[in-house]
Amino acid sequence: MTARAGRTRGSRAARLRLLHAALAAPAALLLAALFAYPLLDLLRLSLEHGSLAHYEAVFSGGLYVRVLWNTARIAVIVTVACAVLGYPLAHFLATAPRGWALFGLLCVVLPFWTSLLVRTYAWMVLLGNNGVVNKLLLAAGIVAEPLPLMHNELGVVVGMVHVLLPYFVFPVYAVMLRVDRDLMAAAEGLGAPLWQVVRRIYLPLTLPGVVAGGTLVFILALGFFITPALLGGGKVMMIALLIDQQVAQMLNWGLASALCMVLVAAILVFHAALKRIARSRAA
Amino acid sequence: MSARRRRRRGARRTAALALYAWCGLVLLFLLLPLVVVFPISFSDSAYLQFPPPRYSLRWYHEFLADPNWTDAAWRSVKVACVAAVVATVLGTLLAFSLVRGDYPGKGLIEQFAMAPIALPSIVYSVGAYKLFSAFQLVGSWQGIAVAHAVHALPLVVLVVGSSLRTIDVATEMAAQGLGASWFTAVRRITLPQIRPALVSAAFIAFISSFDELVIAMFLGGVNVTLPKKMFDSILFEIDPTIAAVSVLQIALVVVVMLIVGRFGAGLRPAS
């Protein structure tokens, strides 16, 4: 190889590297201007006049702390409900005969892609005082008067679980597909009862999926707006509703941006925790 | 011994039955809301009655005849198309850069590009509202489209990036070795190979914008999009028009899923 050929090849590689880096520029600029800048602006607003007054207002007022607490509690309930409903379903999708598994996947994917507003509206049709569920219960004589199924926390939780369940099922399903079935067969062959096989082998092997799906559901649940706004009927307060209220009605930008930052901080903490768990498992 | 085995087989069968029953209930829970809007959308009654007393197309007429609804729908289509194009073009360039590139700060840019997924849209909306109002962009559909493009960008990068990783870079190199320019090599060799991913990414970006409420609510002002109109109508005047709109939206999603299933990648493994 001559020195000249080596140089042109070298400069060509350098040009290609530069080109590849340049391809990121348009998207990076868009993100910097319309994503990073607004967030930093919120951070600045929340620290107005270099003081922590807005954060003190968030954490000292009993009302706001109650909303934060309420948000965390609902997110935990929703996450647990998604796990209880989703874990067996993911197992079914991963192990059922092909036709059934495809049908099941379709049943998860179709609602996943359906508009959130459509689904929330549908739950209002189902859960209202004159709703389908109450009509059926009344007709069957199970209850004497309509049960309060929405405009309360129950309705919000039902709607949120419906929206978030696919986010739990997909990662767990992906992990379950990779589990070696022979391990369970071996354990059973050696005399372990079914519940032991599940508890000692299947659950630990699929735990990474559960942790990933659960964290995703929990993080998404913290920021929910539409479902609590409609199914809560103004009676269930979550942090996203509070932010909206502070901006749209109170024009209290300082407090709203402090609340935004608290929400972002909570998400960052859980995200970091998830990464740490994933890394310690890989090690 | 054989009694024990029989007992175990019985236990297995009970467990399997319990599993199937449970999954049947969960699938019912997932599908019920989608199914229930159909009969209501064809109802003849002005109230929410179930089952409907008589069937008609009244609420579909209502939707198509009301400029408030059709304007909102048309605005949403425009916003979603622009958002999908912007997100797909910029996201594909970025995915290319992240998968093929080798430069300092790449990992940082990748994390930065994924961040909009994890950020709650309420937080993004408040921040964007502040910025957009400084430039008097609140109330313009173009503003919503650009914000939606930011929101959809990570989805495009994920879909296109994972497709780029599966194809062999050697074909692109070979074309260049045979004298093709980089641009020609990418256009003739690489892009055709990732076309299914590009189709999927564009549709995912379209749907994510078309369904988005919170950003559009903050940035839209009086110019409401379809989700905002639905939100208002659920809050203030709950009539079956919204059920008709819902059925049309579910139909749209099914059509998009069929198109993506036929031409795209991601919903099922590309064969």
Image: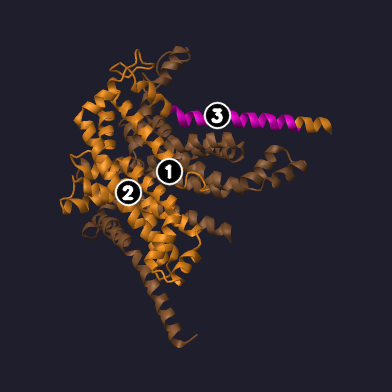
Chain colours: A brown, B orange
Q: Position of residue A187 (x, y in %)?
A: 73, 44
Whether tag 3 and tag 1 are in contact, CB under 8 A, the answer is no
Could you tell me which secondary element the residue under label 2 belongs to? helix
Q: Is residue A28 magenta?
A: no
Would you name the residue on which mark 1 appears? B260
Mark 3 and mark 1 lie on one chain; the one further toward the N terminus is 3
Q: Position of residue B8 (x, y in %)?
A: 75, 33
User: What residue is shown at x 44% (from left), y 57% (from top)?
Assistant: B161
The disc numbered 1 marks a residue on which chain? Answer: B
Quarter holding the C terminus of chain A is: bottom right
User: What residue is shown at x 37% (from left), y 65% (from top)?
Assistant: B183
Query: Is the residue marked by circle 1 packed among few (<14), some (14-19), or many (20+) residues within 10 Å?
Result: many
Mark 3 vs mark 2: in front? 2
- Please state the extent of the stretch shown in magenta in the rendering: B8-32
Mark 2 and mark 1 lie on one chain; the one further toward the N terminus is 2
Q: Main secondary structure of the magenta part?
A: helix
Q: Are marks 3 and 1 on the same chain?
A: yes
A178 left or right of B260? right
Whether tag 2 and tag 1 are in contact, CB under 8 A, the answer is no
Hey, what amino acid is under mark 3? Answer: Gly
Query: Is the residue marked by circle 3 packed among few (<14), some (14-19), or many (20+) residues within 10 Å?
Result: some
Q: Position of residue B250 (x, y in %)?
A: 38, 32
Mark 3 and mark 2 lie on one chain; the one further toward the N terminus is 3
Would you name the residue on which mark 3 appears? B24
| Residue, far front | B178
Hey, what amino acid is under mark 2? Answer: Ala
Q: Is residue B26 magenta?
A: yes
